[in-house]
Amino acid sequence: MNDFKLRNGNGILCAKSCSRQDKQLNTYDYMADIPGHNDESDMVEVQFKNTRKGYYRNSNNLKIEKGDIVAVEASPGHDIGTVTLTGRLVALQMRKANLKSNMEIKRIYRKAKPVDMDKYNEAKKKEHDTMIRARQIAKSLHLEMKIGDVEYQGDGNKAIFYYIADERVDFRQLIKVLADAFKVRIEMKQIGARQEAGRIGGIGPCGRELCCATWMTSFISVSTSAARFQDISLNPQKLAGQCAKLKCCLNYEIDDYVEAQKRLPSKEIELMTKDSTYHFFKADILKGLITYSTDKNFAANAVTITRKRAFEVINMNKQGEKPASLLPTGHPQENKVSADLLEQESLTRFDKLKKNPNNNRKKKKKKATTEPFKEGRIAVPGNNNRKAKDPGNMPRNKRTSANKQPNEKKQG
């Protein structure tokens, strides 16, 4: 295990709280540098493959620190995991995970020995082949499910099959076949499409790594109403993420949009002027700008005003008054075109138009062939700048041959 210490000329700066970034599973132990911190609690947080974590009791009073590989109690046998948190913060993490106090807590056996690591590595080598074989078995049984990953227990006596299914699946026959094929105890665990995308990882359209693969630990349902509140076009290709579900980032700013929407007038209210009646067309919710149109279906005579001006016109209409224009006096309308960020996802948006170097040559040739004859020059194909000789200065025999027509026939 690394000591996580930064050494410099003046001394040692302890950084035990830092550890390898386990994406969304990483926990920053800000109390790690306090003396005796690990002895305040005998509970230890242990991390396994995928997003699986467990909480165990250090009943043997082992000297365990963050990053140690330990053998823990399992049913049956034992499992191998990495210690990710110790001390007082473990109780807070257990409360966050909604673990009941009366539940049975398993214990830590020992720090992993070389023999334990050999069994663990041998079991991990079989996971990929087991997953491919399990997919073939599920397909042969005509089950509407997808096995996304397989995790073997540290001692190789048990295997957890992670699967995705849209509907309820009866996999009792599948468990029997898998147990006979791999000679291990089988456990089926269903995961969602977002959890699978977080496990696989990837890059989103924003250019950053997926949120589900970096920091998100709980997935809240996303509805199309979040896009409607933000006036986003309901295009499934742009609203769906790599998990084929609605993007989780649609929920990030929805509270701000709902709060800002309350400060705008209702979309059903019509604004009346002396000339015509204006209907709601669109709004920039965060900026507080509203665009009204004289037609309900398309932008006709569109006028953009602030929410303050909209409420002023509404109050004037309630009193029976009609302003001459929606715009306040002395403030001409500014035609500002707002950029739609979702329309800028084209892969070729950064490509510049490449100029063809042959275009200039073609233009010059075309210009030279079409320009009128100049004095002392003759247009000859392939040699436009060639000077022509004056026929008057040419010899007599050449002058007569030049004036002859090529297809002239002798008259007999």
Image: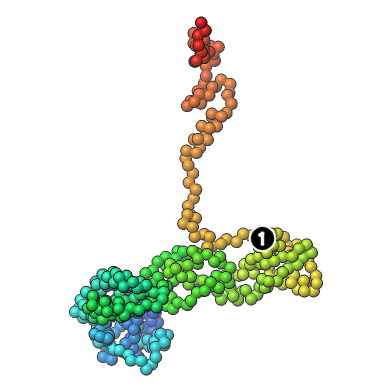
Q: Would you place residue 69 above or below residue 234 in this image?
A: below
x and y, in percent, of residue 216 in the image: 43, 75
Q: Would you place residue 103 above or below residue 247 in this image?
A: below
Specify the quadrant of the image occupied by residue 7: bottom left
- 30 or 412, nearer to the observer: 412
Q: Amino acid at mark 1?
A: Ala
Please indicate whether residue 407 sits to the left or right of residue 98 in the image.
Answer: right
Please indicate whether residue 32 sits to the left or right of residue 303 in the image.
Answer: left
Q: Residue furthest bottom?
A: 102
Image point 63% across, 67% down: which residue? 283
* Pointer 1 residue: 299
x and y, in percent, of residue 370 in the image: 56, 29
Query: Is residue 33 something one can see in this rendering?
Result: no
- 250 or 294, nearer to the observer: 294
Disc 1: CA contacts within 10 A as few (<14), some (14-19) or many (>=20): some
Image point 49% across, 64% down: which residue? 237
x and y, in percent, of residue 137 in the image: 29, 72
Query: Is residue 53 something one can see in this rendering?
Result: yes
Please indicate whether residue 273 sits to the left or right of residue 186 in the image.
Answer: right
Secondary structure at badge 1 equals: loop
Q: Would you place residue 209 above or below residue 97 in this image?
A: above
Q: Residue furthest right?
A: 320
Image point 73% across, 64% down: which residue? 327
x and y, in percent, of residue 185 in the image: 26, 81
